[in-house]
Amino acid sequence: MSESAQERTERATPKRRSDARKRGQVARSREIGAAAVVGAAALTAMMAGSRFTAAAELQMRQLLSLDASALLHPEAMPGLFGQACMQALLLCAPVFAACVCAALLAPMLLGGWNFSVQALQPDFSRLNPLSGLGRMFSGHGAVELLKGLVKLAWIGGVAALYLWQRRESMAALSSEPTAQGIADGASLALGMLGWLAMALVAVAAIDAPYQLWSHAKRLRMSKQEIRDEMKQSDGRPEVKGRLRRMQMEASKRRMMEKVPGADVVVTNPTHYAVALKYSGEGMRAPRVVAKGAGEIAATIRDLARQHNIPLVSAPPLARALYRGVQLDQEIPATLYSAVARILTYVYQLRAWRGGTRPPAEPVIEGVPGGEPDPE
């Protein structure tokens, strides 16, 4: 039985979060963008200062003054109007540029940069009016409506408070000289813009954590979904077991290929078999090239007999080598003495021609780590 959405109590896995980003589903707060745009406009205008005010005064004088020649040539009016619009655009260009940059960079503050090709693909399900009504009357839609009403009341309240506190200054603008009136009007407008920016920052500070929590909640998973994802990521158990067996067989084949090049095989004599190789060039100490127990040990012994590799029965040393030394690893210093006696015997055996008594096989006892296996 499938688990319902109400049972999605587990945090999203890294794979689910990554898949969501590929689909364009990241935490976003529109309030951060609004605050950034208004704040950038206010900051840019304030940085321009008197230069911006002087340019605005000059342009306003030009617009309010009427050239007598224009009355005689009405066809010149569109050109004059276009010239005034171009001057206004150039005057406001720094503010517009700052707003565009803020609008592009603000989304990165929450969720980072994310470009999704899947999000650009058309989704015709959004054209379904029933689905649209469902989204409008859902819990998420109700929260967004409540947020909008609270935001409207908050921003409107801040603007009304600012205008109420500046009501006398606003009323005095009409009686001031033109230059002073323009400067004071610009100052009031910039003040209003700054107050609105601070109000929007407060809204964004509340909305951003909510959007992070809401996004994490939408990505929550049920325990069954986590189990299914683990199966898809790790593969089916039988396939994993087969791959593990294939890897072990390949490792065993590589190990067996090194037995013919060994100098000696130390045996238990039946339970363990460890093949050792020593070369004065590039080796500080003898190295274990193959080892095994049970059937693998029997295979090592058979290969050693086929290639005339000496088999030396030294149970304590065989146990110590099998337990304490990994493949292709040099033996530890604690085993130098015992292995040296084995190699000395091997070299004597190679030098023996059969005319005299063969060298006696060494007796190895008291090897660290060579205790018998517990029953």
Image: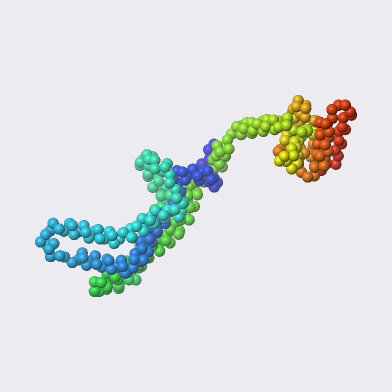
Q: Image point 21% across, 57% down: which residue?
A: 82
Can you say which quadrant of the picture contains the C terminus? top right
Q: Image point 75% across, 37% down: which residue?
A: 278
The residue at the far top in this view is 306
Instruction: Establish if 240 lies above or below 211.
Output: above
Q: Image point 68% across, 30% down: which residue?
A: 253
Give x and y (percent) for residue 73.
Answer: 11, 59
How many numbered discs, if any? 0
Picture colour scheme: rainbow
Residue 351 quadrant: top right
Front residue of 32 and 220: 32
Give x and y (percent) for residue 355.
Answer: 88, 26
Give x and y (percent) for residue 74.
Answer: 12, 58
Residue 279 located left or right of residue 197: right
Can you say which quadrant of the picture contains the N terminus? top right
Residue 66 located left or right of residue 29: left
Front residue of 350 and 369: 350
Residue 375 located left or right of residue 121: right
